[in-house]
Amino acid sequence: MKSLVIIGSRNPLGKTSMAAEAFSSGFATKGCSEKIFLVEKNIERCRQCDASGWGLCRNEGICVIEDDFLSIVERLRQSDIVVFATPVYFGDMSESIKTFLDRLRRITRNEKGKAGIYEKPAIGICVAGGGGGGAVSCCFFMERVLAACGFTVEDMIPCRRQNLELKKSVLVGTGKWFAEILTSGT
């Protein structure tokens, strides 16, 4: 049993990473958890390949850009649950996670692109620093994109730097809960 945690933060020691690690540590009680830091990967923005703004993504469920995107999608397809963790910027997701999800949303318009993604459980974690605002609106935007990709959005967890210690215990519990659900099949 495996979870894949896709992190849209630049800082591997920052608050978003701490939140992702909390989920992973809970999940690790019964499974393994792999983490991917998107900023360490080469992921280009969508090129909107043809005049209609689409391309092979719509017709064949693939992306023609040769970068790290498709290898991450394959790892996502092989996982049992996917967690998307992002810092909050201006009430929204980080640019790296938006870029990844924009391309994922496009390939999942096609049945081939949905393979291994459709109805896969997903969780979103949005961590606001600074004044702590924007986590809830970020969750709203992320949930819309994840649902559009075909994930079954199981939970959206807004965090603020002011309540991160409390939320870490919630995330550990959420990880344990999902590990138990996936192990028992309920």
Image: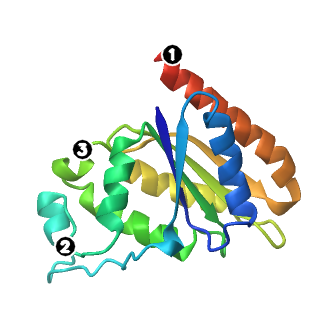
Residue at image mark 3: 115
Earlier in the chain: of badge 2 and badge 3, it is 2
Q: Residue at x 24, y 44 (%)?
A: 115
- 67 or 130: nearer the viewer: 67
Sort mark 3 into few (<14), some (14-19) or many (20+) by Cα contacts within 10 Å: some
Which one is nearer the viewer's eye here, 174 or 38? 38
SS of the residue at dot 2? Answer: loop
Secondary structure under the numbered disc 3 in the rendered image: loop
Residue 160 visible in rendering? yes
Task: Report how far apart the C-alphas of labels 2 and 3 lie in the structure.
Answer: 17 Å
Viewer-nearest of discs 3 and 1: 1
User: Which residue sits at x=75%, y=62%?
Assistant: 15
First along the sequence among labels 2 and 1: 2
Element type where label 1 sits in the image: helix
- Three-letter amino acid code at the position of disc 2: Val
Up the image or down, 134 lies above or below 83; here it is: below
- Residue 105 visible: no
Q: Is residue 69 left or right of residue 19?
A: left
Q: Decide: few, some or many residues near mark 1? Use Cα within 10 Å; few <14, some 14-19, many ≥20.
A: few
How far across and how far down the image is residue 67, in percent?
31, 74
Asked whether the residues under the numbered discs 2 and 1 touch, taking CB atoms below 8 Å apart as contact, a structural biologist would say no
Q: Which amino acid does label 1 sit on?
A: Ser
Residue at image coords 35%, 42%: 78
- Residue at numbered disc 1: 184
Mark 2 vs 3: CB contact within 8 A: no
The residue wearing badge 2 is: 64
**Amino acid type shown at disc 3:** Ala
Q: Distance between the residues labelled 3 and 1?
A: 24 Å
